[in-house]
Image: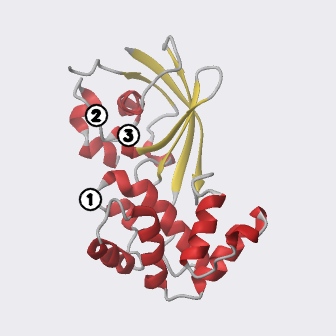
Amino acid sequence: MKLNIKIKSIYTLDEIPNYWTNQDYVALLAAFGFADGNTIKPENLTEMLCMAIADYEPNEAAQIVLTYKLSNDLNEGQIDQLSNEMLLDKVCEEYPEIHLHKHLFSINQLLYKAFNGKFPNAKASSIQFSVLGNDSNELSKSDILKAFNSGLNESNIIKRLFGEPMTTGAKFPEAESLIWELNTKEDSTFQLITSEYLIDRESFINMEFDGEILNEEE
């Protein structure tokens, strides 16, 4: 299937909208020793949580947030190691488990905000684009990345690491983790969020290009 892609806008995000819920904030406040989080007005939860987090040493705070969010994915030793590495590196760009990058980004940015820059500042990209040549708005994350291949420059990290699935009918399960969010707008317009490390404005050769999606092999 051949498509015409037109990039309408690319802008930088320092957080994923609505990633953290009010319930998350209340639960995290409890984890940081503030049991009455449910009495705080919703608009004040983020500020109160950042104050509670800042009362701890940075690596201790990282350990608590990592445990809250990723205890089902990481063991105690991995969490302890990550809590120290996060102070030095953007682990949300480098961690070998790609499916955790979105969560590590949001954890990193919460800690970055609470500690006023003691953690590295990671960035995400929000890309809005239109797709012509598709009979429906039901394109998967794999479809989108395959269609993007011809528009991305040769140095793009996704293109370099996943050249085979980007250019063939090979299955591309990693696309589910590489694109953090994919939202369908009206008039064949889509919006995706991913790491700026993976795709940014400089990643595109042109803002309009033709892409092709080869049917995935059974």
Residue at 75% in and 62% down:
42
70 sits left or right of 106 in the view:
left
The image position of residue 151, as x and y in percent, is: 41, 33
Using the rendered view, name the quadrant where residue 128 is placed.
top right
Residue on which the image places disc 2 = 172
Q: Earlier in the sequence, mark 3 or mark 1?
A: 1
Q: Earlier in the sequence, mark 1 or mark 2?
A: 1
Residue on which the image places disc 1 = 96
Q: Which mark is residue 176?
A: 3
Asked if residue 139 is positioned above or below residue 22 in the image, the reply reads above
Asked if residue 151 is positioned above or below residue 51 in the image, the reply reads above
Q: Would residue 11 be visible to someone looking at this image?
A: yes
76 sits left or right of 21 in the view:
left
Gap in Å between the C-alphas at discs 3 and 2?
Answer: 8 Å
Residue 104 versus residue 118: which sits nearer the camera?
A: 104
Q: Secondary structure at mark 3?
A: helix
The image position of residue 35, as x and y in percent, is: 64, 77
